[in-house]
Image (cartoon, rainbow, N blue to C red):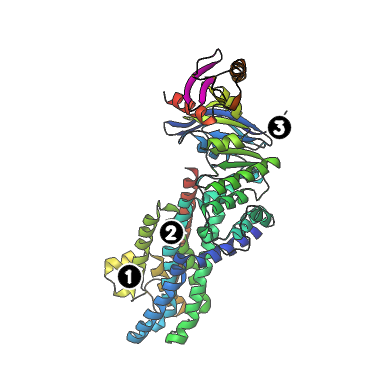
Amino acid sequence: MVETVVSVQGLIKRYGEIAAVNSISFEVGKGEVFGLLGPNGAGKTTALECLEGMRRPDGGALSVCGRNPQQDGKRLRQVLGVQLQASSLPDGIRPAEAMKLICAWHGLQPRDDLLNRFGIDVQGKKHYSEMSTGQKRRLHLALALASNPSVIILDEPTAGLDVQGRAQLHDAIRELKAEGVTIVLATHDMAEAESLCDRIAIIIRGSIAVTGTPAQITSAGHAETRITICTKGNSLLPGKDMFNARFLSQSDNYGLWLCRDTAAAVMELLQEVQQSGDSVEDLRVERPSLEERFLELVEGGRK
Amino acid sequence: MNAFLNHLWIQFKMDIREKGTLLTYYLVPLVFYLVIGAVFSSVNPASKQTMAAAMPIFAITMGAVLGMPVPIVKMREAGVLRAYRVSGIPGWAVLLIHSLSAFLHLMVVTVIIFVTAPLLYGANIPQNIAAYFLILLILLFANIALGLLIGVSARSQSIATILSQAVFLPTVMLGGIMFPASMLPEPLRIIGYVLPSTHAMQAFSSLAYGLPSDISAAISLSVMAGIGVLASGLAVVRYRTSMKS
């Protein structure tokens, strides 16, 4: 039984008449990477801000390592690190000064090791305003880890980063997970969520549409698995519907089938090839992506 | 306490690195002092009597009322206050440290003027130096509190600039810095009485230099302190309200 470190039960947050977050509930276990996905304005950041103690919820119960974000603000900061979606530091501050400042308020020695770990020059004279977006993001992540928190909230940490910057941050998140840090991650990036998260909740219009592992969420959708096959003698072409697979199209010497039961369909196609005395040159199986499932949910939500 | 002092030292250094702050805290007041001091001391020798008081009033008002608010608004707009808050740095500490850093910078400028004015322009040295610095402290408190209030109240940097100018320009024109307030028309002189600089000038004249003044020093000091207490109280209320919303 994994210990629950983050608990959100029936969280409600309204702005006037509009319910930005409408009774959402989820739990995150120790060492888990939990992703919050959703279109713009779905309520991800609002939900996280309630969890961070930055906004006062209109209903529901929240807990981070047993602390109430609204009542135990000071104790919360000892266990929770936060990288906000939109935040900044004073233009004239240097990375080492920012680290010194935050560590001093936590009663700790400056964690220059964290700056080194994220490739930030500790001795550098560069000011915050002179740093690249990637460097700033890495600095904010390092600062979020300064107090050695057991839970960290990352709100779209890779937004605006180039490919290399994203890869570096992804590696950092994996390292944190390996160290047992619990991570709550809000993102727009499906590939990021699929590769980093143990479980995901998709939020649409302030409510959770689905929760589960990336595999569970994709398999629960209506999209079908694609099987693309090319044989030496083109025995499967022109293509036809099989019992377990529906023929879709043909391109060059490749035929494309759609199926729900992938194993049965592949077996059936291979059997057909074998019976024709043919052999397979190339076989590809593509399961529906999280992005397809996400779009399906979002479109469904709009309808 | 260690965290507070560390933060204050870093803020003090950041203020020097920030061009806008450097201009309003040091460069403009000192250039104004050097140029206007030279002009006034030659065309109006009487101005030497209180030059070591008038120029610091200008420098303090400029630094606190024009220099402080915009960086506070900028911190809020850019998300610096939010980043500090989630990192465990209390909002009150950020504002207090900002104010104390401004206090230290403006004290440095004042001391430069106090020491050099007699040497460069033959300005009178105050008869009562303790009273001079007491008035200075109260003036700093009042103006920094006003700067803080503008900073936490203004919704944008442009509004902060407008509000700052609305205090700063009357201070220069009506406060008795450029010419005696007694020369002003009655309505403008009355308006001038709501400004800390007017009362500072009156208090400097009577308490520090032993010159005649229109208002008693006790009243002037009380008005300045009252403005400081009121402005800082309103700033705290405004800040708390904005944090809740």
Q: Is residue B31 visible to us here?
A: yes
**Residue behind mark 2:** B70
Residue B157 place in picture, x, y as percent = 40, 56
Q: CA distance from mark 3 to mark 2?
A: 47 Å
Residue B63 place in picture, x, y as percent = 44, 67
* Amino acid type shown at disc 1: Met
**Residue behind mark 1:** B173
Q: Is B23 or A202 nearer to us in this picture? A: A202
Give the extent of the magenta segment.
A240-258
Q: Is A115 or B217 nearer to us in this picture? A: A115
Q: Is residue A302 above or below residue B217?
A: above
| Tag 3 and tag 2, C-beta contact below 8 Å | no
Task: Check chain identity for marks 3 and 2: say if they share one.
Answer: no
- Is residue B29 found left or right of B10 in the rendered image? left
Q: Is residue B196 above or below residue B44?
A: above
* Amino acid type shown at disc 3: Glu
Q: Say which chain tag 3 marks.
A: A
Residue A98 place in picture, x, y as percent = 59, 57
Q: Is residue B226 visible to us here?
A: no
Q: Is residue A196 above or below residue B44?
A: above
**Does A241 lie within the magenta span?**
yes
> Which residue is drawn at the image coordinates 34% and 66% (left, top)?
B169
Q: CA distance from mark 2 to mark 1?
A: 22 Å
Task: Find residue A3 and name its label.
Answer: 3
Other residues around mark 2 within 10 Å, as few (<14) / some (14–19) / many (≥20): many
Name the mark nearer the viewer: 2 or 1: 2
